[in-house]
Image (cartoon, grey):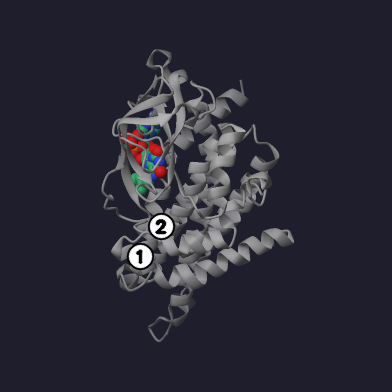
Amino acid sequence: MDYFLTEEQQMIVDIAAQISDERIIPRRAELDESHTFPREILNEMARADLFGISLPEEYGGLGGGCFDIVLAVEQFGRGCVGVGTAFAANYLGCFPILLGGSDEMKKRYLPQVVAGEKFAAFGLTEANAGSDASGIQTTAVADGDEWVLNGTKQWITNGGEADFYSIVAMTDRSKGPRGASMFVVEAGDPGFSCGPKEKKMGIRASATTELIFKDCRIPKDRIIGRAGTGFITVMKTLDLSRPGIGALAVGLGQGALDEAVRYAKQRQQFGRPIITFQAVQHLLADMAIGVETARAMVYAGARHIDAHPKQMSKVSAICKTFATDMAMKVTTDAVQVMGGYGYMCEYPVEKMMRDAKILQIYEGSNQIQRNVIGQELNREYA
Ligand SMILES: Cc1cc2nc3c(=O)[nH]c(=O)nc-3n(C[C@H](O)[C@H](O)[C@H](O)COP(=O)(O)OP(=O)(O)OC[C@H]3O[C@@H](n4cnc5c(N)ncnc54)[C@H](O)[C@@H]3O)c2cc1C
């Protein structure tokens, strides 16, 4: 389908697609098997200016928006969701600074990310605070010219690989959710360390670790915005980022459809290619319907967010939920089309099916997204 992209947008798609085809796809099985973080591929993305797509020009970025970033992320999702997640989590780590940080803070961190010199991550989740983020236990206490952080974050993407982390901690527990604040913690800050890499079902090229703060001391000016605004910044960050998860899902669905069609055309049973059986054609047709409708939704949602940045939550949740549920179904059906071969590791669809599952869980599970959509509907129809 023609989405009438501008010349610049088409250029983003072409560059990202080239990196996906030439650098990601040939290495994705090996990266997955060896749980290897794709540092060289990310460096290549940075050299192609893709780390700056949606960061403002004054900080060295290309000044694009949510739609521009979605176009690149989709191509990386087509190649490997593990690599795409590492790329997307870098933006996730930058968004709190972009949305809530001072000009000085933006100048300090964002140009280095654009140049590929620094890499970012985002730390909210803890062992007892997943969907219910208000349960976080990590604290930050002011002490002279410093903040002292204590606590442990869990399952943080790019953990151990990032140079700085946008993290959430309670600065005043008595104020409940209004007592949370965001901070930038740098790798090497005293009292800060990362746990070992988690072993995961999928997205194994991405690194997932704990972030451990033991009397971690950081300068006073590392707070993002004002004390107490932490959860507002978190919600805005995730609203801005979730269409990107939808885009990873669209790319993944497209990749699975491509594999399934190619296979169905060459696999012969009962003396003819299996694509000539109507039952197989209908499976493929439903996969194509899912991928294209999710793409249209994610593109439209991202464009809406660029035009109406104050009305993000519902649209962003719809993009994430619809596209990621589609990717789970389409990758499962791709394995079905390919039969026993689809189940074998020598074909890429088993990895795609494993990778799809996390998209329905992280950045807010799809049940939580449905809660967000339902609450917005309740408000809209008041
Ligand atoms: C590989 C990976 C990478 C991640 N990367 C990051 C990262 O970079 N930064 C970060 O901060 N976090 C990250 N996370 C954490 C992720 O965002 C959480 O796992 C997610 O928000 C869900 O929290 P939970 O796993 O604790 O599940 P829980 O909150 O315990 O939920 C368990 C189940 O209950 C359901 N549920 C819970 N509450 C409700 C409710 N009110 N209504 C309906 N259903 C409900 C959920 O949908 C889910 O199905 C990552 C997680 C993984 C696995």
Q: Quadrant of residue 225?
A: top right
Point out which mark residue 82 bears. 2
Please state which of residues 1 and 72 is positioned toward the viewer in this rendering. 72
Q: Residues within 10 Å of mark 2 (few under 14, many from 20)?
A: many
Q: Residue 294, image x and y in percent?
A: 56, 53
Point out which mark residue 31 bears. 1
- Amino acid on which disc 2 is placed: Gly
Point out which mark residue 218 bears. none
- Residue at the image point whose x is 30% and y is 54% from the top: 201
Q: Which element is circle 2 on? A: helix
Query: Would residue 361 be seen by someone viewing this image from the given angle?
Result: no
Counting residues from the start of the chain, the first of labels 1 and 2 encountered is 1
Q: Find out whether the residues at labels 1 and 2 contact each other: C-beta distance under 8 Å.
A: yes
Please state which of residues 346 and 120 is positioned toward the viewer in this rendering. 120
Which quadrant is home to the N terminus?
Answer: bottom right
Q: Quadrant of residue 328?
A: bottom left
